[in-house]
Image (spheres, helix red, strand yellow):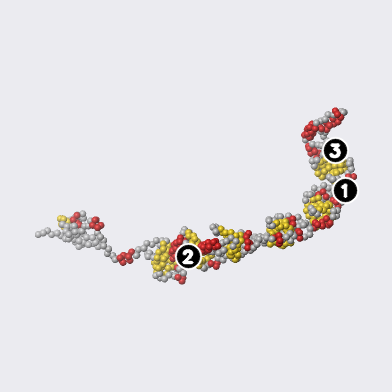
Amino acid sequence: MSETVPEPVVEQTNDSLELEVSAETTEEAPTTSNNAEAVIADAPATDATGDESPVEEAETELNYLAPDLFNDVKQVSLEELLDTEVVEEIPQEEQDRYLSTFSEISEREIVTGRVIGMNEKEILIDIGFKSEGIINRDEFPEDALPDVGEKLDVYLERMEDESGKTVLSKEKADFLRRWTQLREVHETGEIIQGRIVRRIKGGMVVDLEGVQAFLPGSQIDVRPVKDFDKYIDTNMDLRVVKFNEFRKNVVVSHKAILEESLAEQRDELFKKLEIGSVIEGRVKNITDFGVFIDLGGIDGLLHITDLSWGRVNHPTELISMDDTLSVKIIDFDQEKKRVSLGLKQLTPHPWENVEERYPEGTKIKGKIVSMTNYGAFVEIEPGVEGLVHVSEMSWTRHVKNPSEIYSLRDDLEAVVLAIDTEERKISLGAKQLQADPWDQIEEKYMVGTVVKGKVINLTQFGAFVELEEGIDGLIHVSDLSWTKVVRHPKEIIEKGQEVEVRVLEVSRESRRIALGLKQLEDDPWPGLVKQYETGKEVEGEIVRILDKGIILLLGQDVEGIVPFGRQTKRQRKALSSKYKTGQKMSGVVMEVKPDDKKVVLLVEELNVDKPSKKDEVQDFLESQDTPEGEKIEIPTDTIEETEGETEAADE
């Protein structure tokens, strides 16, 4: 009989669901392909309650490293795996549908989405992301809301905001798409159309299908624009002249398009220009220095000096905007595209035959167009002016500036005095329209007559007295008083004072009248000479103390002078310090000088002479009783040297 091997007892528990194997045999059982495990040795038997049987436990072991463990498993080498060809079994349609569920989405890009719904504030867009995107409903006009299921290109601003929603923008998507188009338009120079939406400082704002651009006011037209509001809500052809990628700034121009079209016309017109020809144009712009004329593609300058033969202060005096003028071509430069025009050249020069139209002595009427210190310029006719010099404005007044009589733009009548055709100068006179009052002056103011007048001016040398309007005479300081030494006329008369004077001299040629105030009375000096006879002692009041003497007021405005003797400066200073102004002093009359209006007095104290060396020598020589031929002659050099020593000793 063969040996029997007891079957293993397997118990399944509720917790681990693990299998426990036991055997009673102590021998190692052979491993077969039909058994998953090999049972070695005996295992203690257990009953249904889980308690161990008194059977002796046997230790069970399994060798997982045995090489024969994988005998029934097919083994493949690495080379065989690499050489094995994989056959695609999945249909292409299913693969594409599967791959379409994956999308590479990133922020700040334009993506395509489908409208799946909307509410009062937002529109829901499916962009293939884990959550739907939202767009503010205000980005769409109420009459242009998208339909559900409609596909839109949108701009992905944020993958997720604070609430986990994907933020999208339709406006930014349109802006970026249009921005890309404008970049290409700027590079190619293509002409696009925009709509002017509003006016701002310096120009207009233009809508370029979602992108707002700036249209400067100077780039709207080739000529200055006065009314900008008329362009609002109008379409205009434009060209992008500036494209700033960083600042997202676009500047457009309509003028650039117009200038291109005018360039061809300009070239054709320059070929037809001829100096001296007359052409018609429209006033395009007015400046301080001239007028710009549009000649049909070329701008010509009509300088202010070529507007009229006469004086023009500003072009607006003759020209207005948009006026149509016929002008003469003076010069042009095709390379610099400059044309000089003239308007006055269409009429003859006004100085032609001017001597025949205005001979000397002719009375003319004109308007004062300019004033200077020396005269006023009068426009006789456009291009012909004459000068009225200040000396030719009045017979009687001493005019220093023409503004004393005239004002700018005043109408004036004058007489032609002289014409210089070569220098183109005309001398005019206004006073010649009236009679010269000095023609009858000698008969009217005869020498010796007494007249009345008004003191109008005081000077150091005299007083001017107005005898009648424009006629005045001079009272010299020497003719104000017989006895008083007058140093200024204000000591005797005042400005504005009415005085009577005597006419001393009248000169019609030099237009001067000499008057005298003291001549109204008789000369008192013949009586004064008798009154102040030599040797008579008189008393007076000290009025001035000078270096050479003391001046006394004796009476009747007669001044007496007490000269210092031959004394040194130190002695004179010591003597003069003893006297003060207002003090009384007596002296002896030495001499009366009517011409100098002085009485010379002698005061012993002030006239003590100091003998000099020269006097001593002279007295000694005179005392010698020597014949005439034997007198000693002192050389002149010695006398002069002695005088010099004397003066030095006095000092």
Q: Quick one: quadrant of the N terminus?
A: bottom left
Residue located beneath label 2 in the image: 192
Which is more N-terminal, label 1 or label 3?
1
Q: Which residue is mark 1?
A: 524
Q: Position of residue 452 (x, y in %)?
A: 83, 56
Q: Earlier in the sequence, mark 2 or mark 1?
A: 2
Real-space Cα distance between discs 3 and 2? 120 Å
Q: What amino acid is found at the position of numbered circle 3 in the picture?
A: Glu
Residue at the spot 56% in from the left edge and 66% down from the top edge = 227
Q: Decide: marks 3, 1 in contact (CB < 8 A)?
A: no
Which residue is at 41% across, 66% downward?
Answer: 153
The disc label shown at residue 604, or none? 3
Residue in the foreground of this view, choosing between 616 and 266: 266
What type is the residue that disc 1 sits on?
A: Pro
Q: Residue at x 83, y 36 (%)?
A: 608
Q: Secondary structure at mark 1?
A: loop
Secondary structure state at the residue bearing disc 3: helix
**Residue at mark 3 to residue at mark 1: CA–CA distance:** 29 Å
Relative image position of residue 552 (x, y in whole percent)? 83, 44
